[in-house]
């Protein structure tokens, strides 16, 4: 097999038995790899009745055909499971070093089922796969557990591990690769910890076979030139993912004070990539094979927010722990980020839940009795850090409540607090405001895992950084309008599947041309795609995820934005701007072949060879 | 062949006044000053090169060769410049679609993108005052 390694490791943690699955090449081709393949395997091999944290529930790690091919963006791999945060389909994507190493161990993916009686970790090396006792690792923070495993297996061993938050059953526990790279969203770490699996360690030597290596090198060369010439990639390398935060703040894109105000210039200026570079940056870092180098390495020397040198906050975290909580203290945000890495929580859900809690306290839905005597106030940098710790450790009444995520916490306390939620289908919206980009609102609404900007490239379409006339993405998209958006959202959803299944980082992915994608799949994996057949496989991936949502209880009525995001703002560039969701969803349903109930019609599913799912949804 | 400009003098009349008012504007002036760099706009059809010298607290502009090394140079048609100052051209989109060629680092300049709405108000005022209201977009 080319590109892919041809084997998927299935591990039953209850019995300790392992099996190597060999799927037909057609399955790889039809589902690309990564998250779409993982969704297929969840459907085919999982117990769909199982609750997210039941032993029978599956957790799947899946690399893509392009993982580890030594190009900028090609280090990623996917995780998928029924999410303990949302109750329906969940997935996450992680860069770093582990995905390529998994393939060097000879595997495209790992399917985990069951629950080990005692804590274990999974070791993949030249000796094969084995489960190793990990009682001494249980309870250790991410950095310490990673250090111990690297000391034991060598510094070149690649590690993914969960932290105490996942072990404690926080619903949005993350999985970390080599310290700072994370499967952040949807609680994949919580599922892993529930299986008593602390970590996976990989160290291999196998090589990827290319269908046509010389032709591949031509594409790689052209892509590298595009990366080197791109001003966006230059900015990312110099200033990180928050390179343009000040401008985005003025544009109304940066959520502030739980999405209640439209502009906070001082917040944007204090937290933007340039400020970070001038103050706490000590170095930059990169995922394997990437020339962009957007990762930040930071150090804070002064108390009370002292941070030892290590992975720094990216844009989403700077916003979630910063402007969202009306906190413009960069050192404190770096501290909260470090704590989140060590304890293993998703910073987007955690920051969003904290911001929701502060507003709930301000408006009386949470009382001082509910908060164990803690005053929750806007703009309190120490509070954000304190709450990350309490949530991750489920400490006290407040820590326990917020560890559920904002939607479940609001359901529990009521008193109108659900009006301040930003969740779609249980997942807190990421840090880009659909009131500034209306198509992005529709993208959040139809995303397979709930509000998500990396499952759909609509943000970049409306920003103006994607232009593909060959697939109809060539309009002058007015960001704050529903005009021309439905078609772009549908295409962008497929392109999101492409990125997450290939598995590719969306930032360097912006510099890819459509034909390069086709060529890469063909030269690396021998998929024999043309543009249309490649897009058909992307759509298939989107539909199987959509069907899993329906199987797990999501309906068309859930295709909407959180109530807070639908409230018009009274200041800034996006004053009075609210997406016309009704119009966009109607148009998207028609284009996508969804019925009025939001479910794919039988005819639509037949088009993608998924007719068996018509009975299940 | 320009859709909006009959000659370079006409363009110069409009842009000189626009840049003057921008630099004097109490909101835009300080933001431009913060860039602390030399910016060059190289227009074609008709051909003219403008520079902004925003180094060391200066807020100067002129045509021809810049007074020092530029940090970023944007090359575009004079018509697209007109669209841009009228807030009818998304700069990111124009760069992606190769309507604007960038030499150097444009990160700082892109920070001013959200201010184009305000620039357009000033620009339309300039066009009115210069008897060029028919050019307003």
Image: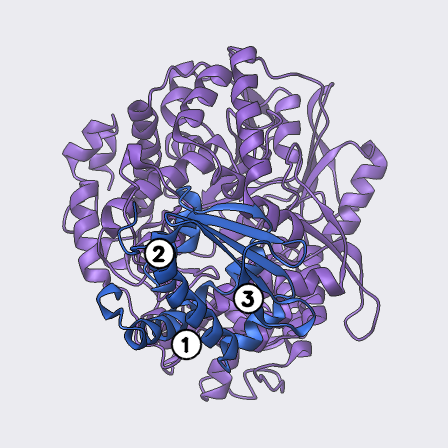
Chain colours: A purple, B blue
Front residue of A91 and A565: A565
Where is residue B53 drawn, in percent x and y? 61, 65
Disc 2: CA contacts within 10 A as few (<14), some (14-19) or many (>=20):
some
Q: Chain of mark 3?
A: B
Quadrant hosting residue A494:
top left
Q: Secondary structure at mark 1?
A: loop
Q: Is residue A252 above or below residue A357?
A: above
Where is residue A543 drawn, in percent x and y? 30, 38
Front residue of B73 and A228: B73
User: What is the number of the mark on residue B61?
Assistant: 3
Q: Give the alpha-carbon distance from disc 1 to disc 2, as whole Å.
A: 20 Å
Quadrant hosting residue A168:
bottom right
The nearer-to-camera label among 1 and 2 is: 2
Where is residue A435 drawn, in percent x and y? 35, 67
Q: Are marks 3 and 2 on the same chain?
A: yes
Q: Give the alpha-carbon distance from disc 3 to disc 1, as whole Å.
A: 29 Å
Q: Which residue is mark 2?
A: B89
Identify the residue at horizontal 58%, vertical 41% (top origin).
A115
User: What is the number of the mark on residue A201?
Assistant: none
Q: Chain of mark 2?
A: B
Q: Earlier in the sequence, mark 3 or mark 2?
A: 3
Front residue of B82 and A260: B82
């Amino acid at each position: 097999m080319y590109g892919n390694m041809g084997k998927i490791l299935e591990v039953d943690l209850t019995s300790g038995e392992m099996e190597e699955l060999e799927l037909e090449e057609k399955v790889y081709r039809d589902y690309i790899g990564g998250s779409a393949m993982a969704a297929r395997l969840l459907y085919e091999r999982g117990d769909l009745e199982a609750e997210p944290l039941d032993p029978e529930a599956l957790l799947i790690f899946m690399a893509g055909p392009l993982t580890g091919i030594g190009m900028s963006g090609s280090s990623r791999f996917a995780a998928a499971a029924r999410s303990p945060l949302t109750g329906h389909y969940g997935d996450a994507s992680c860069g770093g070093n582990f995905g390529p190493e998994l393939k060097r161990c000879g595997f495209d993916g790992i399917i985990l089922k069951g629950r080990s009686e005692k804590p274990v970790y999974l070791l993949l090396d030249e000796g094969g796969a084995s489960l190793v006792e990990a009682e001494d690792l249980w309870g250790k923070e991410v950095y310490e557990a990673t250090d111990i495993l690297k000391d034991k297996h060598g510094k070149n061993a690649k590690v993914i591990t969960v932290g105490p938050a996942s072990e404690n059953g926080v619903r949005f526990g993350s999985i970390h690769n080599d310290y700072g790279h994370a499967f952040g969203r949807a609680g994949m770490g919580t599922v892993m910890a529930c299986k008593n699996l602390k970590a996976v360690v990989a160290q291999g030597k196998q090589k990827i076979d290319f269908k046509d290596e010389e032709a591949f090198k031509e594409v790689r060369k052209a892509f590298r030139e595009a990366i080197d010439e791109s001003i966006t990639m230059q900015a990312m390398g110099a200033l990180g993912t928050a390179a343009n935060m000040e401008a985005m703040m003025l544009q109304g894109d940066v959520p502030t004070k739980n999405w209640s105000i439209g502009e906070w210039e001082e917040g944007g200026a204090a937290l933007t990539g340039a400020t970070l570079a001038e103050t706490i940056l000590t170095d930059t870092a990169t995922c394997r094979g990437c020339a962009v180098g957007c990762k930040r390495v930071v150090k804070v020397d002064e108390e009370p927010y002292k941070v030892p040198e290590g992975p720094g906050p990216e844009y989403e975290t700077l916003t979630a722990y910063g402007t969202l909580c009306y906190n413009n203290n960069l050192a404190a945000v770096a501290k909260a980020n470090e704590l989140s890495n060590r304890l293993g929580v998703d910073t987007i859900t955690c920051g969003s839940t904290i911001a929701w809690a502060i507003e709930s306290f301000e408006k009386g839905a949470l009382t001082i009795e509910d908060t164990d005597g803690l005053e929750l106030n806007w703009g309190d940098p120490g509070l954000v850090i304190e709450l990350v710790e309490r949530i991750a450790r489920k400490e006290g009444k407040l820590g326990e409540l917020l560890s559920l995520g904002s939607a479940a916490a609001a359901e529990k306390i009521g008193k109108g607090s659900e009006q301040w939620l930003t969740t779609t289908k249980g997942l807190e919206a990421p840090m880009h405001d659909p009131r500034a980009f209306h198509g992005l609102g529709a993208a959040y609404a139809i995303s397979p895992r709930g509000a998500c900007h990396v499952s759909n490239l609509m943000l970049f379409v409306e920003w103006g950084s994607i232009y593909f006339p060959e697939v109809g993405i060539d309009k002058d998209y007015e960001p704050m309008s529903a005009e021309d958006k439905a078609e772009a959202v549908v295409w962008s959803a497929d392109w999101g599947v492409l990125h997450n299944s290939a598995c590719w980082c969306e930032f360097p992915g912006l510099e890819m041309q459509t034909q390069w994608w086709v060529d890469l799949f063909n030269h690396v994996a021998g998929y024999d795609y043309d543009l249309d057949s490649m897009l058909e496989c992307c759509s298939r991936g989107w539909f199987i995820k959509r069907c899993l949502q329906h199987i797990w209880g999501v309906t068309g009525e859930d295709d909407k934005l959180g109530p807070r995001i639908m409230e018009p703002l009274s200041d800034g560039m996006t004053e009075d701007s609210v997406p016309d969701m009704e119009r966009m969803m109607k148009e998207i349903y028609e284009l996508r072949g969804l019925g009025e109930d939001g479910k794919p019609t039988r005819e639509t599913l037949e088009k993608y060879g998924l007719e068996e799912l018509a009975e299940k949804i | 062949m320009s859709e909006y400009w009959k000659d370079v003098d006409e363009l110069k009349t409009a842009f000189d006044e626009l840049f003057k008012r921008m630099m004097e504007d109490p909101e835009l002036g300080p933001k431009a000053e913060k860039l602390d760099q030399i910016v060059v706009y190289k227009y074609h059809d008709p051909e003219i090169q403008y520079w902004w010298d925003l180094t060391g607290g200066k807020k100067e502009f002129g045509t021809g060769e810049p007074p020092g090394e530029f940090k970023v140079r944007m090359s575009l048609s004079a018509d697209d410049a007109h669209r841009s100052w009228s807030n009818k051209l998304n700069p990111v989109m124009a760069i992606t679609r190769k309507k604007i060629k960038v030499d150097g680092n444009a990160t700082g300049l892109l920070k001013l993108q959200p201010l184009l709405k305000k620039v357009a108000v000033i620009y339309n005022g300039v066009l009115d005052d210069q008897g060029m209201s028919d050019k307003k977009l």
